[in-house]
Amino acid sequence: MTPVLHTQGLGKRYGQRWALTDCTLSVPAGHAVGLVGPNGAGKTTLLNLAVGMLAPTSGTIEVLGGRPGGGRAQLARVGFVAQDTPTYAALSVADHLRLGARMNPGWDAALARGRIERLGLDPRQRAGKLSGGQRAQLALTLAVAKRPELLILDEPIASLDPLARREFLESLAEFISGRQVSVVLSSHLVSDLERICDYLIVIVASRVYLAGEVGDLLAAHRKLTSSQSTLEDLVLAAMGQAADTIGEPRR
Amino acid sequence: MMWLTWRQSRAQTIAAAAALAGLAIVLAVTGSSVAHLYDASGIAGCHPFASCRTLVDGFTSKLTSTDGFLYGIGIAVLLLAPALIGVFWGAPLVTREIEARTLPLAWNQTVTRTRWMAVKLGLVGLAATATAGLLTFMLTWWSSPIDTALSMGTTSRINLTRLGPVLFDSRDITPVGYAAFAFALGVTAGVLIRSTVPAMAATLAGFAAVQVAWPIWIRQHLIAPVHTVVALNPASVFQIKSNNDNMIISAMPNFEQRGAWVLSSQIVDRSGHAAHVMTNPVCLGNNFAACQAWIGRLHLRQIVSYEPASRFWDFQWAETAIFVALAVALAAFCTWWIRRRVA
Protein backbone atom coordinates (compact mmCIF):
# COMPACT_ATOMS: atom_id res chain seq x y z
CA MET A 1 0.00 0.00 0.00
CA THR A 2 1.23 3.53 -0.74
CA PRO A 3 2.65 5.17 2.35
CA VAL A 4 0.67 8.21 3.51
CA LEU A 5 3.86 10.14 4.07
CA HIS A 6 7.12 9.36 2.33
CA THR A 7 10.10 11.67 2.61
CA GLN A 8 13.69 11.37 1.47
CA GLY A 9 16.37 13.70 2.84
CA LEU A 10 13.69 16.35 3.26
CA GLY A 11 14.89 19.75 4.49
CA LYS A 12 13.51 23.25 4.82
CA ARG A 13 15.61 26.34 5.41
CA TYR A 14 14.42 29.81 6.37
CA GLY A 15 17.24 32.18 5.55
CA GLN A 16 20.19 30.76 7.45
CA ARG A 17 18.21 28.54 9.79
CA TRP A 18 17.25 24.96 8.99
CA ALA A 19 13.77 24.27 10.41
CA LEU A 20 13.95 20.66 9.26
CA THR A 21 16.97 18.69 8.13
CA ASP A 22 17.57 15.34 6.51
CA CYS A 23 14.14 13.98 7.26
CA THR A 24 13.64 10.48 5.87
CA LEU A 25 10.37 8.80 6.79
CA SER A 26 7.87 6.33 5.44
CA VAL A 27 4.59 6.20 7.30
CA PRO A 28 2.28 3.33 6.27
CA ALA A 29 -1.41 3.98 5.67
CA GLY A 30 -4.12 3.34 8.20
CA HIS A 31 -2.44 4.77 11.24
CA ALA A 32 -3.15 7.61 13.61
CA VAL A 33 0.27 9.18 13.73
CA GLY A 34 1.40 11.33 16.60
CA LEU A 35 4.07 13.88 15.81
CA VAL A 36 5.76 15.02 18.99
CA GLY A 37 8.61 17.30 19.83
CA PRO A 38 9.40 20.43 21.75
CA ASN A 39 8.17 23.80 20.52
CA GLY A 40 10.13 24.92 17.49
CA ALA A 41 11.42 21.43 16.69
CA GLY A 42 10.06 21.47 13.13
CA LYS A 43 6.65 19.81 13.51
CA THR A 44 4.74 22.62 11.85
CA THR A 45 7.33 22.83 9.08
CA LEU A 46 6.97 19.12 8.31
CA LEU A 47 3.17 19.32 8.25
CA ASN A 48 3.16 22.44 6.09
CA LEU A 49 5.46 20.65 3.66
CA ALA A 50 3.02 17.73 3.66
CA VAL A 51 0.10 19.91 2.55
CA GLY A 52 2.13 21.98 0.10
CA MET A 53 1.89 25.23 2.05
CA LEU A 54 5.70 25.17 1.96
CA ALA A 55 8.05 23.93 -0.72
CA PRO A 56 11.07 21.89 0.39
CA THR A 57 14.57 23.37 0.23
CA SER A 58 16.10 19.93 -0.23
CA GLY A 59 14.96 16.33 -0.60
CA THR A 60 11.56 15.03 -1.65
CA ILE A 61 8.17 14.49 -0.07
CA GLU A 62 5.24 12.44 -1.28
CA VAL A 63 1.85 12.34 0.38
CA LEU A 64 -0.43 9.45 -0.55
CA GLY A 65 1.96 8.97 -3.46
CA GLY A 66 1.36 12.47 -4.83
CA ARG A 67 2.97 15.88 -4.74
CA PRO A 68 1.66 17.90 -1.78
CA GLY A 69 -0.86 20.52 -2.91
CA GLY A 70 -0.33 19.42 -6.51
CA GLY A 71 -3.69 19.80 -8.15
CA ARG A 72 -7.32 19.24 -7.23
CA ALA A 73 -7.11 15.46 -6.96
CA GLN A 74 -4.37 15.71 -4.34
CA LEU A 75 -6.15 18.53 -2.47
CA ALA A 76 -9.33 16.44 -2.30
CA ARG A 77 -7.48 13.55 -0.64
CA VAL A 78 -5.90 15.52 2.21
CA GLY A 79 -7.71 17.40 4.97
CA PHE A 80 -5.76 19.97 6.95
CA VAL A 81 -6.40 21.80 10.19
CA ALA A 82 -3.67 24.41 10.57
CA GLN A 83 -2.16 25.67 13.79
CA ASP A 84 -4.59 27.88 15.76
CA THR A 85 -7.46 26.33 13.74
CA PRO A 86 -8.16 29.28 11.42
CA THR A 87 -11.68 30.16 10.32
CA TYR A 88 -13.16 33.24 8.63
CA ALA A 89 -14.09 35.47 11.57
CA ALA A 90 -16.77 37.38 9.62
CA LEU A 91 -18.44 34.25 8.25
CA SER A 92 -21.09 32.34 10.18
CA VAL A 93 -20.94 28.65 11.00
CA ALA A 94 -23.49 28.00 8.22
CA ASP A 95 -21.35 30.04 5.80
CA HIS A 96 -18.40 27.80 6.60
CA LEU A 97 -20.44 24.70 5.78
CA ARG A 98 -21.59 26.34 2.52
CA LEU A 99 -17.96 27.17 1.77
CA GLY A 100 -16.98 23.56 2.35
CA ALA A 101 -19.84 22.28 0.18
CA ARG A 102 -19.02 24.66 -2.69
CA MET A 103 -15.29 24.12 -2.64
CA ASN A 104 -15.15 20.34 -2.20
CA PRO A 105 -16.80 17.92 -4.63
CA GLY A 106 -16.62 15.10 -2.09
CA TRP A 107 -18.36 17.12 0.62
CA ASP A 108 -20.36 15.06 3.11
CA ALA A 109 -23.13 17.48 4.06
CA ALA A 110 -24.84 15.05 6.43
CA LEU A 111 -21.61 14.47 8.31
CA ALA A 112 -20.95 18.20 8.61
CA ARG A 113 -24.48 19.05 9.72
CA GLY A 114 -24.54 16.17 12.17
CA ARG A 115 -21.31 17.32 13.78
CA ILE A 116 -22.46 20.92 14.10
CA GLU A 117 -25.73 19.74 15.68
CA ARG A 118 -24.00 17.43 18.15
CA LEU A 119 -21.62 20.22 19.11
CA GLY A 120 -24.58 22.49 19.72
CA LEU A 121 -23.19 25.27 17.51
CA ASP A 122 -25.60 27.95 16.35
CA PRO A 123 -25.36 28.01 12.52
CA ARG A 124 -25.97 31.77 12.48
CA GLN A 125 -23.12 32.47 14.91
CA ARG A 126 -20.12 34.20 13.37
CA ALA A 127 -16.91 32.19 13.64
CA GLY A 128 -15.19 35.19 15.23
CA LYS A 129 -17.61 34.96 18.15
CA LEU A 130 -17.00 31.26 18.85
CA SER A 131 -14.87 30.05 21.74
CA GLY A 132 -11.47 28.57 20.95
CA GLY A 133 -12.81 25.05 21.40
CA GLN A 134 -15.83 25.67 19.18
CA ARG A 135 -13.65 27.23 16.49
CA ALA A 136 -11.32 24.22 16.57
CA GLN A 137 -14.35 21.95 16.19
CA LEU A 138 -15.60 24.00 13.25
CA ALA A 139 -12.18 23.80 11.58
CA LEU A 140 -12.13 20.04 12.18
CA THR A 141 -15.62 19.74 10.71
CA LEU A 142 -14.49 21.47 7.51
CA ALA A 143 -11.49 19.18 7.25
CA VAL A 144 -13.34 15.91 7.87
CA ALA A 145 -16.48 16.63 5.83
CA LYS A 146 -14.46 16.82 2.65
CA ARG A 147 -13.87 13.09 3.33
CA PRO A 148 -10.09 13.01 3.02
CA GLU A 149 -7.98 9.88 2.94
CA LEU A 150 -5.46 11.62 5.15
CA LEU A 151 -6.26 14.12 7.84
CA ILE A 152 -3.43 16.36 9.03
CA LEU A 153 -3.82 18.39 12.22
CA ASP A 154 -1.18 20.84 13.40
CA GLU A 155 -1.41 21.36 17.15
CA PRO A 156 -5.17 21.84 16.92
CA ILE A 157 -5.65 21.79 20.68
CA ALA A 158 -2.53 23.58 21.91
CA SER A 159 -4.45 26.66 23.00
CA LEU A 160 -7.55 24.93 24.36
CA ASP A 161 -8.58 24.37 27.95
CA PRO A 162 -8.51 20.76 29.20
CA LEU A 163 -12.24 20.20 28.75
CA ALA A 164 -12.32 21.53 25.18
CA ARG A 165 -9.18 19.52 24.48
CA ARG A 166 -10.83 16.30 25.63
CA GLU A 167 -13.98 17.02 23.64
CA PHE A 168 -11.91 17.73 20.53
CA LEU A 169 -9.94 14.50 20.85
CA GLU A 170 -13.13 12.56 21.47
CA SER A 171 -14.79 13.91 18.37
CA LEU A 172 -11.64 13.23 16.38
CA ALA A 173 -11.51 9.64 17.68
CA GLU A 174 -15.17 9.23 16.82
CA PHE A 175 -14.50 10.33 13.24
CA ILE A 176 -11.55 8.00 12.84
CA SER A 177 -13.20 4.91 14.24
CA GLY A 178 -14.55 2.62 11.56
CA ARG A 179 -13.28 4.79 8.68
CA GLN A 180 -10.44 4.12 6.25
CA VAL A 181 -8.65 7.29 7.14
CA SER A 182 -5.10 8.03 8.20
CA VAL A 183 -4.37 10.86 10.61
CA VAL A 184 -1.25 12.82 11.43
CA LEU A 185 -1.64 14.89 14.58
CA SER A 186 1.11 17.02 16.07
CA SER A 187 1.40 18.11 19.67
CA HIS A 188 4.00 18.87 22.24
CA LEU A 189 1.94 17.03 24.82
CA VAL A 190 2.30 13.26 24.74
CA SER A 191 -0.77 12.78 26.89
CA ASP A 192 -2.89 14.27 24.09
CA LEU A 193 -1.66 11.74 21.59
CA GLU A 194 -1.63 8.69 23.85
CA ARG A 195 -5.34 8.03 23.53
CA ILE A 196 -5.53 8.25 19.76
CA CYS A 197 -2.20 7.47 18.19
CA ASP A 198 -0.78 4.07 17.31
CA TYR A 199 2.24 5.45 15.49
CA LEU A 200 4.76 7.95 16.77
CA ILE A 201 7.28 10.33 15.24
CA VAL A 202 9.59 12.27 17.56
CA ILE A 203 11.22 15.40 16.17
CA VAL A 204 13.92 17.16 18.17
CA ALA A 205 15.89 20.20 17.01
CA SER A 206 14.77 19.93 13.36
CA ARG A 207 15.64 16.22 13.07
CA VAL A 208 13.46 13.14 13.13
CA TYR A 209 14.71 11.20 16.09
CA LEU A 210 12.34 8.28 16.36
CA ALA A 211 9.56 6.86 14.21
CA GLY A 212 7.54 3.66 14.50
CA GLU A 213 4.43 1.92 15.76
CA VAL A 214 3.72 2.73 19.37
CA GLY A 215 3.50 -0.95 20.35
CA ASP A 216 6.92 -1.77 18.92
CA LEU A 217 8.54 1.36 20.32
CA LEU A 218 7.14 0.69 23.79
CA ALA A 219 8.20 -2.96 23.76
CA ALA A 220 11.74 -2.02 22.80
CA HIS A 221 11.87 0.71 25.39
CA ARG A 222 10.51 -1.53 28.16
CA LYS A 223 13.23 -4.08 27.48
CA LEU A 224 15.80 -1.42 28.28
CA THR A 225 14.01 0.12 31.24
CA SER A 226 11.09 -1.07 33.29
CA SER A 227 7.91 -2.86 32.28
CA GLN A 228 5.86 0.04 33.61
CA SER A 229 7.29 2.54 31.17
CA THR A 230 4.65 4.70 29.50
CA LEU A 231 4.62 6.50 26.18
CA GLU A 232 5.48 9.67 28.05
CA ASP A 233 8.62 8.03 29.52
CA LEU A 234 9.57 6.80 26.09
CA VAL A 235 9.26 10.24 24.47
CA LEU A 236 11.07 11.97 27.32
CA ALA A 237 13.91 9.46 27.14
CA ALA A 238 14.11 9.91 23.36
CA MET A 239 14.19 13.69 23.68
CA GLY A 240 16.85 13.47 26.37
CA GLN A 241 19.02 11.20 24.23
CA ALA A 242 18.44 13.42 21.21
CA ALA A 243 19.53 16.47 23.16
CA ASP A 244 22.68 14.61 24.29
CA THR A 245 23.58 13.47 20.77
CA ILE A 246 22.87 16.77 19.11
CA GLY A 247 24.35 18.81 21.90
CA GLU A 248 23.85 22.52 21.71
CA PRO A 249 20.94 23.71 19.59
CA ARG A 250 22.02 23.87 15.97
CA ARG A 251 22.29 27.16 14.21
CA MET B 1 -14.62 29.63 -4.96
CA MET B 2 -16.86 32.20 -6.65
CA TRP B 3 -19.27 31.93 -3.77
CA LEU B 4 -16.54 32.50 -1.18
CA THR B 5 -15.15 35.50 -3.09
CA TRP B 6 -18.61 37.00 -3.36
CA ARG B 7 -19.31 36.30 0.32
CA GLN B 8 -16.03 37.96 1.34
CA SER B 9 -16.48 41.06 -0.81
CA ARG B 10 -20.26 41.33 -0.52
CA ALA B 11 -20.29 44.19 1.99
CA GLN B 12 -17.92 46.43 0.06
CA THR B 13 -19.58 45.65 -3.29
CA ILE B 14 -23.01 46.57 -1.92
CA ALA B 15 -21.59 49.74 -0.35
CA ALA B 16 -19.99 50.74 -3.64
CA ALA B 17 -23.21 50.02 -5.54
CA ALA B 18 -25.24 52.10 -3.06
CA ALA B 19 -22.80 55.01 -3.33
CA LEU B 20 -22.95 54.82 -7.14
CA ALA B 21 -26.76 54.77 -7.07
CA GLY B 22 -26.86 57.83 -4.78
CA LEU B 23 -24.44 59.68 -7.02
CA ALA B 24 -26.46 58.69 -10.09
CA ILE B 25 -29.58 60.34 -8.64
CA VAL B 26 -27.75 63.59 -7.79
CA LEU B 27 -26.10 63.72 -11.20
CA ALA B 28 -29.30 62.91 -13.11
CA VAL B 29 -31.16 65.78 -11.43
CA THR B 30 -28.44 68.42 -11.73
CA GLY B 31 -27.06 67.15 -15.03
CA SER B 32 -30.27 67.64 -16.98
CA SER B 33 -30.45 71.32 -15.95
CA VAL B 34 -26.81 71.81 -17.00
CA ALA B 35 -27.63 70.19 -20.34
CA HIS B 36 -30.66 72.51 -20.78
CA LEU B 37 -28.55 75.58 -20.07
CA TYR B 38 -26.02 74.41 -22.64
CA ASP B 39 -28.65 73.78 -25.30
CA ALA B 40 -30.13 77.24 -24.68
CA SER B 41 -26.73 78.97 -24.78
CA GLY B 42 -26.22 78.46 -28.52
CA ILE B 43 -22.61 77.37 -28.01
CA ALA B 44 -23.18 74.21 -30.03
CA GLY B 45 -23.74 76.05 -33.33
CA CYS B 46 -21.59 79.11 -32.77
CA HIS B 47 -19.28 80.34 -35.50
CA PRO B 48 -16.68 81.79 -35.86
CA PHE B 49 -14.60 80.53 -33.01
CA ALA B 50 -13.70 83.97 -31.65
CA SER B 51 -17.35 84.92 -31.18
CA CYS B 52 -18.07 81.89 -29.00
CA ARG B 53 -16.40 83.27 -25.92
CA THR B 54 -19.28 85.56 -25.14
CA LEU B 55 -21.70 82.66 -25.35
CA VAL B 56 -19.40 80.55 -23.15
CA ASP B 57 -19.21 83.29 -20.54
CA GLY B 58 -23.01 83.61 -20.67
CA PHE B 59 -23.38 79.85 -20.14
CA THR B 60 -20.90 79.58 -17.29
CA SER B 61 -22.40 82.57 -15.47
CA LYS B 62 -25.80 80.78 -15.39
CA LEU B 63 -24.39 77.67 -13.72
CA THR B 64 -25.20 77.42 -10.02
CA SER B 65 -22.49 77.16 -7.38
CA THR B 66 -23.61 73.55 -6.86
CA ASP B 67 -22.91 72.86 -10.51
CA GLY B 68 -19.44 74.35 -10.18
CA PHE B 69 -18.84 72.35 -7.02
CA LEU B 70 -20.02 69.11 -8.64
CA TYR B 71 -17.85 69.76 -11.69
CA GLY B 72 -14.75 70.13 -9.53
CA ILE B 73 -15.68 67.21 -7.28
CA GLY B 74 -16.35 65.06 -10.33
CA ILE B 75 -12.83 65.63 -11.60
CA ALA B 76 -11.38 64.97 -8.14
CA VAL B 77 -13.42 61.76 -7.72
CA LEU B 78 -12.28 60.38 -11.06
CA LEU B 79 -8.64 61.29 -10.42
CA LEU B 80 -8.74 59.67 -6.96
CA ALA B 81 -11.00 56.67 -7.66
CA PRO B 82 -8.31 54.43 -9.22
CA ALA B 83 -5.92 55.07 -6.34
CA LEU B 84 -8.66 54.36 -3.78
CA ILE B 85 -9.63 51.18 -5.62
CA GLY B 86 -6.00 50.04 -5.56
CA VAL B 87 -5.58 50.90 -1.89
CA PHE B 88 -8.85 49.54 -0.50
CA TRP B 89 -9.74 46.74 -2.91
CA GLY B 90 -6.40 45.67 -4.35
CA ALA B 91 -3.92 45.79 -1.49
CA PRO B 92 -6.02 43.91 1.14
CA LEU B 93 -7.21 41.21 -1.27
CA VAL B 94 -4.51 38.75 -0.21
CA THR B 95 -2.93 40.45 2.83
CA ARG B 96 -6.22 40.25 4.74
CA GLU B 97 -6.06 36.45 4.41
CA ILE B 98 -2.38 36.41 5.36
CA GLU B 99 -3.02 38.48 8.48
CA ALA B 100 -6.13 36.53 9.52
CA ARG B 101 -4.15 33.30 8.86
CA THR B 102 -6.95 31.96 6.70
CA LEU B 103 -4.74 30.93 3.78
CA PRO B 104 -4.20 27.37 5.09
CA LEU B 105 -7.99 27.03 5.28
CA ALA B 106 -8.58 28.46 1.79
CA TRP B 107 -5.75 26.55 0.16
CA ASN B 108 -6.75 23.17 1.56
CA GLN B 109 -10.18 23.00 0.01
CA THR B 110 -10.46 21.20 -3.32
CA VAL B 111 -9.54 24.34 -5.25
CA THR B 112 -6.06 24.94 -6.62
CA ARG B 113 -4.18 28.05 -5.61
CA THR B 114 -4.14 29.22 -9.22
CA ARG B 115 -7.89 29.10 -9.42
CA TRP B 116 -8.26 30.69 -5.99
CA MET B 117 -6.13 33.64 -7.10
CA ALA B 118 -7.67 33.88 -10.57
CA VAL B 119 -11.23 33.97 -9.24
CA LYS B 120 -10.38 36.55 -6.59
CA LEU B 121 -8.55 38.74 -9.11
CA GLY B 122 -11.24 38.28 -11.73
CA LEU B 123 -14.35 38.92 -9.66
CA VAL B 124 -13.09 41.66 -7.37
CA GLY B 125 -11.15 43.23 -10.24
CA LEU B 126 -14.30 43.21 -12.34
CA ALA B 127 -16.27 44.90 -9.55
CA ALA B 128 -13.51 47.50 -9.16
CA THR B 129 -13.27 48.34 -12.86
CA ALA B 130 -17.06 48.32 -13.22
CA THR B 131 -17.25 50.86 -10.39
CA ALA B 132 -14.73 53.09 -12.16
CA GLY B 133 -16.57 52.55 -15.45
CA LEU B 134 -19.93 53.64 -14.04
CA LEU B 135 -18.33 56.62 -12.30
CA THR B 136 -16.66 57.89 -15.45
CA PHE B 137 -19.74 57.17 -17.58
CA MET B 138 -21.95 59.27 -15.29
CA LEU B 139 -19.48 62.06 -14.66
CA THR B 140 -18.36 62.35 -18.28
CA TRP B 141 -22.00 62.71 -19.36
CA TRP B 142 -22.68 65.24 -16.61
CA SER B 143 -19.59 67.33 -17.36
CA SER B 144 -19.57 67.22 -21.16
CA PRO B 145 -21.48 70.54 -21.69
CA ILE B 146 -19.09 72.34 -19.37
CA ASP B 147 -16.06 70.57 -20.89
CA THR B 148 -17.12 71.62 -24.38
CA ALA B 149 -17.74 75.20 -23.29
CA LEU B 150 -14.42 75.50 -21.48
CA SER B 151 -12.51 74.00 -24.41
CA MET B 152 -13.60 77.05 -26.46
CA GLY B 153 -11.47 79.12 -24.15
CA THR B 154 -12.70 81.46 -21.49
CA THR B 155 -11.52 84.89 -20.52
CA SER B 156 -9.38 83.32 -17.84
CA ARG B 157 -6.06 81.71 -18.73
CA ILE B 158 -7.06 78.45 -17.06
CA ASN B 159 -7.53 76.32 -20.10
CA LEU B 160 -9.06 72.91 -19.48
CA THR B 161 -8.75 71.03 -22.73
CA ARG B 162 -9.99 67.48 -23.06
CA LEU B 163 -6.51 66.35 -24.05
CA GLY B 164 -4.87 68.15 -21.14
CA PRO B 165 -3.59 66.16 -18.15
CA VAL B 166 -6.54 66.88 -15.84
CA LEU B 167 -9.50 66.21 -18.12
CA PHE B 168 -7.91 63.42 -20.13
CA ASP B 169 -7.30 61.42 -16.94
CA SER B 170 -10.84 61.93 -15.68
CA ARG B 171 -13.00 61.45 -18.77
CA ASP B 172 -14.38 58.66 -20.93
CA ILE B 173 -12.58 55.32 -20.78
CA THR B 174 -9.14 56.04 -19.34
CA PRO B 175 -10.34 55.85 -15.68
CA VAL B 176 -11.33 52.23 -16.35
CA GLY B 177 -7.79 51.40 -17.47
CA TYR B 178 -6.28 53.23 -14.50
CA ALA B 179 -8.64 51.46 -12.08
CA ALA B 180 -7.75 48.03 -13.46
CA PHE B 181 -4.07 48.89 -13.22
CA ALA B 182 -4.32 50.36 -9.70
CA PHE B 183 -6.25 47.29 -8.51
CA ALA B 184 -3.65 44.90 -9.91
CA LEU B 185 -0.87 47.10 -8.51
CA GLY B 186 -2.51 46.89 -5.08
CA VAL B 187 -2.80 43.11 -5.23
CA THR B 188 0.83 42.85 -6.36
CA ALA B 189 2.02 45.08 -3.52
CA GLY B 190 0.00 42.94 -1.09
CA VAL B 191 1.37 39.68 -2.41
CA LEU B 192 4.96 40.94 -2.23
CA ILE B 193 4.79 42.93 1.02
CA ARG B 194 2.35 40.58 2.78
CA SER B 195 1.10 43.23 5.18
CA THR B 196 -1.98 45.40 4.60
CA VAL B 197 -0.98 48.88 5.70
CA PRO B 198 2.49 48.96 4.10
CA ALA B 199 0.99 47.46 0.93
CA MET B 200 -1.66 50.21 0.89
CA ALA B 201 1.02 52.88 1.28
CA ALA B 202 3.13 51.35 -1.49
CA THR B 203 0.09 51.17 -3.79
CA LEU B 204 -0.79 54.80 -3.17
CA ALA B 205 2.78 55.98 -3.72
CA GLY B 206 3.25 53.80 -6.80
CA PHE B 207 0.01 54.78 -8.48
CA ALA B 208 0.41 58.48 -7.68
CA ALA B 209 3.88 58.40 -9.22
CA VAL B 210 2.52 56.85 -12.40
CA GLN B 211 -0.42 59.26 -12.52
CA VAL B 212 1.88 62.27 -12.25
CA ALA B 213 4.73 61.02 -14.42
CA TRP B 214 2.58 59.69 -17.26
CA PRO B 215 1.24 62.97 -18.73
CA ILE B 216 4.57 64.73 -18.13
CA TRP B 217 6.97 62.27 -19.71
CA ILE B 218 5.17 59.43 -21.42
CA ARG B 219 1.79 60.27 -22.99
CA GLN B 220 3.12 62.51 -25.78
CA HIS B 221 5.30 59.65 -27.02
CA LEU B 222 2.31 57.42 -27.70
CA ILE B 223 1.58 59.40 -30.88
CA ALA B 224 4.28 61.72 -32.27
CA PRO B 225 3.27 65.38 -31.83
CA VAL B 226 2.66 67.78 -34.73
CA HIS B 227 5.08 70.70 -35.18
CA THR B 228 3.96 73.91 -36.78
CA VAL B 229 5.48 77.39 -37.27
CA VAL B 230 3.24 80.38 -36.69
CA ALA B 231 3.83 84.12 -36.58
CA LEU B 232 4.19 85.47 -33.06
CA ASN B 233 1.20 87.58 -32.14
CA PRO B 234 2.50 90.43 -29.97
CA ALA B 235 -0.86 90.56 -28.20
CA SER B 236 -0.30 87.04 -26.87
CA VAL B 237 2.96 87.99 -25.14
CA PHE B 238 2.30 87.76 -21.43
CA GLN B 239 5.73 87.88 -19.85
CA ILE B 240 9.07 89.47 -20.62
CA LYS B 241 12.20 88.84 -18.63
CA SER B 242 15.53 90.48 -19.14
CA ASN B 243 18.61 88.35 -18.74
CA ASN B 244 21.73 90.54 -19.07
CA ASP B 245 21.41 91.81 -22.64
CA ASN B 246 18.89 89.26 -23.83
CA MET B 247 15.13 89.28 -23.47
CA ILE B 248 13.19 86.14 -22.72
CA ILE B 249 9.72 86.43 -24.17
CA SER B 250 6.85 84.18 -23.12
CA ALA B 251 3.79 84.08 -25.31
CA MET B 252 0.69 81.95 -25.74
CA PRO B 253 0.87 79.98 -28.98
CA ASN B 254 -0.91 81.95 -31.65
CA PHE B 255 -2.90 79.33 -33.45
CA GLU B 256 -6.50 78.38 -33.75
CA GLN B 257 -6.36 74.73 -32.80
CA ARG B 258 -9.39 74.20 -30.68
CA GLY B 259 -8.67 71.95 -27.71
CA ALA B 260 -5.16 71.03 -28.79
CA TRP B 261 -2.74 69.86 -26.13
CA VAL B 262 0.24 72.19 -26.54
CA LEU B 263 3.43 70.46 -25.47
CA SER B 264 5.94 73.24 -26.13
CA SER B 265 6.38 76.45 -28.04
CA GLN B 266 9.68 78.06 -28.88
CA ILE B 267 10.22 81.60 -30.17
CA VAL B 268 12.44 81.72 -33.27
CA ASP B 269 13.59 84.38 -35.70
CA ARG B 270 12.74 84.51 -39.39
CA SER B 271 15.46 82.02 -40.30
CA GLY B 272 14.09 79.51 -37.80
CA HIS B 273 16.86 79.79 -35.22
CA ALA B 274 16.22 80.39 -31.56
CA ALA B 275 15.55 84.09 -31.21
CA HIS B 276 18.17 86.27 -29.52
CA VAL B 277 16.53 89.56 -28.81
CA MET B 278 18.69 92.34 -27.42
CA THR B 279 17.02 94.08 -24.55
CA ASN B 280 15.14 97.18 -25.62
CA PRO B 281 14.78 99.86 -22.91
CA VAL B 282 11.14 100.28 -23.99
CA CYS B 283 10.41 96.87 -22.51
CA LEU B 284 12.00 97.69 -19.17
CA GLY B 285 9.57 100.51 -18.53
CA ASN B 286 5.91 100.40 -17.64
CA ASN B 287 4.58 100.86 -21.12
CA PHE B 288 3.87 97.24 -21.98
CA ALA B 289 1.85 98.18 -25.10
CA ALA B 290 4.84 100.01 -26.59
CA CYS B 291 7.00 97.00 -25.88
CA GLN B 292 4.48 94.69 -27.55
CA ALA B 293 4.39 96.99 -30.61
CA TRP B 294 8.17 96.89 -30.80
CA ILE B 295 8.15 93.08 -30.54
CA GLY B 296 5.63 93.01 -33.40
CA ARG B 297 8.13 94.77 -35.66
CA LEU B 298 10.69 92.00 -35.07
CA HIS B 299 8.52 89.52 -37.05
CA LEU B 300 9.25 86.65 -34.69
CA ARG B 301 7.74 83.23 -35.06
CA GLN B 302 6.82 80.35 -32.80
CA ILE B 303 7.48 76.68 -33.32
CA VAL B 304 4.59 74.96 -31.60
CA SER B 305 4.47 71.26 -30.99
CA TYR B 306 1.06 69.94 -30.04
CA GLU B 307 -1.32 67.05 -30.13
CA PRO B 308 -4.46 68.00 -32.08
CA ALA B 309 -7.81 67.60 -30.35
CA SER B 310 -8.88 65.14 -33.04
CA ARG B 311 -6.51 62.59 -31.52
CA PHE B 312 -8.50 62.47 -28.27
CA TRP B 313 -9.97 59.03 -28.89
CA ASP B 314 -6.74 57.62 -30.33
CA PHE B 315 -5.06 58.58 -27.07
CA GLN B 316 -7.97 57.31 -24.97
CA TRP B 317 -7.91 53.88 -26.61
CA ALA B 318 -4.13 53.60 -26.66
CA GLU B 319 -3.76 54.56 -23.03
CA THR B 320 -6.63 52.40 -21.79
CA ALA B 321 -5.22 49.43 -23.72
CA ILE B 322 -1.77 49.99 -22.20
CA PHE B 323 -3.07 50.17 -18.63
CA VAL B 324 -5.37 47.18 -19.05
CA ALA B 325 -2.41 45.23 -20.47
CA LEU B 326 -0.27 46.28 -17.50
CA ALA B 327 -3.06 45.15 -15.16
CA VAL B 328 -3.28 41.77 -16.86
CA ALA B 329 0.51 41.37 -16.66
CA LEU B 330 0.50 42.21 -12.94
CA ALA B 331 -2.40 39.81 -12.32
CA ALA B 332 -0.54 37.04 -14.11
CA PHE B 333 2.54 37.80 -12.03
CA CYS B 334 0.51 37.61 -8.80
CA THR B 335 -0.96 34.27 -9.77
CA TRP B 336 2.46 32.89 -10.64
CA TRP B 337 3.97 34.24 -7.42
CA ILE B 338 1.20 32.78 -5.27
CA ARG B 339 1.72 29.41 -6.91
CA ARG B 340 5.47 29.43 -6.53
CA ARG B 341 6.07 31.28 -3.30
CA VAL B 342 3.81 30.01 -0.64
CA ALA B 343 2.54 30.89 2.79
Image (cartoon, coloured by chain):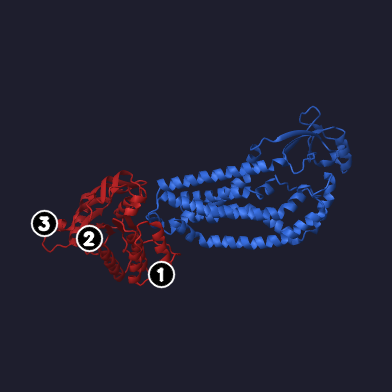
Q: Residue B128: name its quadrant.
A: bottom right
Using residue A188 as the reference point, say whether residue B305 is left or right of it.
right
Residue at screen point 67% across, 63% down: B25
**Which residue carries the number 3 mark?**
A224
Image coordinates for residue A111, horizontal then vertical, percent = 33, 65
The local secondary structure at tag 3 comes to helix
Among the 4 quarters of the image, the one containing residue B256: top right
Point 39% across, 54% down: residue: B107
Indicate the chain coloured blue by its letter: B
Q: Earlier in the sequence, mark 1 or mark 2?
A: 1
Q: Nearer the viewer, mark 1 or mark 2?
A: 1
Label ID, residue A123: 1
Q: Nearer the viewer, mark 3 or mark 1?
A: 1
- Amino acid beneath label 2: Cys
Q: Quadrant of residue A173?
A: bottom left
Residue under label 2, please give it.
A197
Q: The disc numbered 3 marks a residue on which chain? A: A
